[in-house]
Amino acid sequence: MALQTLNGIRRPDELPDGQGGSGGDLSEGSSTIDEREIMETIVGTSNRILEVNLSDRTRHVITVTEEDRKLYLGGKGLGLKLIHERLAPGVDPLGPDNLLVFMMGVMMGTGAPCSGRFAALTKSPLTGIMLSSSCGGPFGMALKTAGYDGLVIGGRSEAPVYLNIDADRVAFEDASELWGLDTRETQARLADGKKSGVMAIGPAGENRVLFANVASGHRFLGRGGMGAVMGAKNLKAVMAIGGRYKIQPHDSARFKAVSHKAGRQVDANHFTGHAYRNFGTAANVNLCNQGGILPVSNFRGGTHQRAGEVSGETMQKKYNTRPSTCLPCRILCGHKGTYPDGSVRQIPEYETTSLLGPNIGIFDTEKISEWNDLCGAMGLDTISTGATLAWVMEAGERNLRPTDLSFGSPAGISDTIRAIAHRQGQGDELAQGTRRLAAKYGGADFAIQIKGLDMAGYDPRGAWGQGLSYAVANRGACHLSATTFSLEVFMGFLNPYTTRAKAHFVKYFENLFAAVNSLHVCQFTAFAYVLEEPIVKYTPKGMLRLTMQYLPRIAQNLIFIPTLTGLYNSVTGLSVSQAQFLAAGERIHTLERLMNTREGISRKDDTLPVRFLREGRGCDPKKRTVPLETMLDAYYRLRGFDSRGIPKTETLSRLGLTG
């Protein structure tokens, strides 16, 4: 028989509970679906989101409207809208009413460059505000080709459980024998061939460590404690078995042409086609060291003479690295290598390398790799783990809290990581994170966190725009909200030591990246899709620099992103202009801000650790600090927020949002 298309075919809203609450055919009991009718192709998007309640083991399908698809795109944007509609302010992040939302985005399954990523959203137990994350593991493709664009999980199971999802059923399976296993062991037990994908937590998530993460393959939903939310729900894992559907763009010819262009742009760009492809994201080590923004000894330094020992270039030579990445990837930034003991391991990413390396005084790549593997198995965010270790070391130096850990020594670190994951001994306290540790012992000035989220590996005193970006980022000290450090330090388009134009570019790239993370494609592709367009690529760098620094609005009007809109439109069959695409990004970003202000976030929280406001870097003879307040005022004006950082009524109205 001819293949049927799923797009546009309505499935019943309410799905059966199954027998004994343990499974059931999604179409059981429905007279509107012929059991002999097997749909094999999804044209564009399925527009079906599965919603599951762990408390009563019910599930149903949410239908995505065309209007929501245009206004929120998919991925992060659509996930935020779903949570905004369902989650009241003040909900306990570790309570049954919190939601976990996983969104696949419209690019998943199309084969577009770097499109194998999915988004996850929840309320963070570490920060108490909205948390979004991105992952490149196999779960996303499995769920998408099982016929779903997303998954919403609420409630709490009475006993440990894992979800088993395919195109025909949702089963609630006993996970008692999996409880206590690490992330790798859990995935190995559940993996069921190439068409399956698993998300799993380790002991850290089970024990509700506030910075526990979620693993899918060797990729992670890393920040803010998403693993703790799963653990609090007694949800050990989610398994999807895909392969039922293939994803076909609405306009295959146009998609093929745009996708081919996208690949060429990725290959041509210095970062995506050379630095990250050859040396992984740890290529940033040398760039940050040269620019004075490398975290050293709990962000007291900025540079270190031994930094090159842990760079991506060094690891490429030492371990004969080769690609080990999420699929389909054109950049190939993920690498694995062969270590002296003969083992083949993932090469640590830049954030892991910097926070578990120079930031605690370590320049031994074997140790950093060991801790990276251990954190991955336990299900711990490496950024917050490194930040917590650094705070403990400095607190010990200042006699605020006793510890045997010290900068430059690997002694005790592996045991401490295990203790954190299992909440044993001092690990129970460290599992609360730096903000809570500082509240108990003092030392808030050197707790390198914002809104509770520990800072990634870029010192804002050497990139003032990044300081603003950190301060206002919706999830806390997030380096991915606007990544202005790349413009200031890596590319030299903006003077890092001026406030001029910084608010303009923080706002612009927040909007762009919110949209990119709602397609959903790898954020690194934005380097290529922006910089390899002719008007940017062939304009003399000096002229670009002057225009960006002194005429930021004009410079932004010269940025074209036809690759991104072309991919989106050819897949979905919709017609979204560049202006509409960026407006969607602004809507998504502002909605997230609105949800945070409902939780009490305001100007008082849009700040930096005292270290960056009052204390210069060790590498900077001028001892410059971040002049945040001037940039903050300009940013609020551009955003349409009031002086407290609250979105104004007219801003919400313009974007179609309600308070």
Image (cartoon, helix red, strand yellow):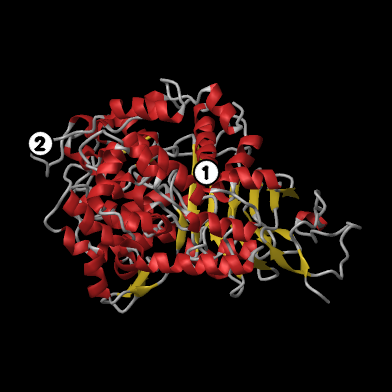
Say which residue label 2 marks. Answer: 622
Front in this rendered view, residue 448 or 118: 118
Q: Is residue 182 visible?
A: no
Q: Does dot 1 land on a helix, a strand or a loop?
A: helix
Front in this rendered view, residue 426 or 26: 26
Q: Residues within 10 Å of mark 2 (few under 14, many from 20)?
A: few
Q: Residue at coordinates 59% horizontally, 65% vertically from top-left?
A: 254
Q: In this picture, is 400 found above or below 291?
A: above
Front in this rendered view, residue 183 or 475: 475
**Spatial separation of the CA atoms under disc 1 and disc 2:** 42 Å
Pick out the residue farthest to the bottom.
Answer: 342
Q: How many marks?
A: 2
Q: Is residue 589 visible?
A: yes
Q: Residue at coordinates 19% horizontally, 48% vertically from top-left?
A: 296
Say which residue label 1 marks. Answer: 579
Q: Which mark is residue 134?
A: none
Say what amino acid the circle numbered 1 marks: Ala
First-in-chain label (1 vs 2): 1
* Spot occupied by residue 43 in the image (x, y as percentages of width and height): 69, 63
> Which image quarter holds the C terminus?
top right
Front in this rendered view, residue 566 or 600: 566
Q: Nearer the viewer, mark 1 or mark 2?
A: 1
Say what amino acid the circle numbered 2 marks: Lys
> Which image quarter holds the N terminus?
bottom right
Quarter where residue 275 is shown: bottom left
* Spot occupied by residue 26 in the image (x, y as percentages of width and height): 79, 58
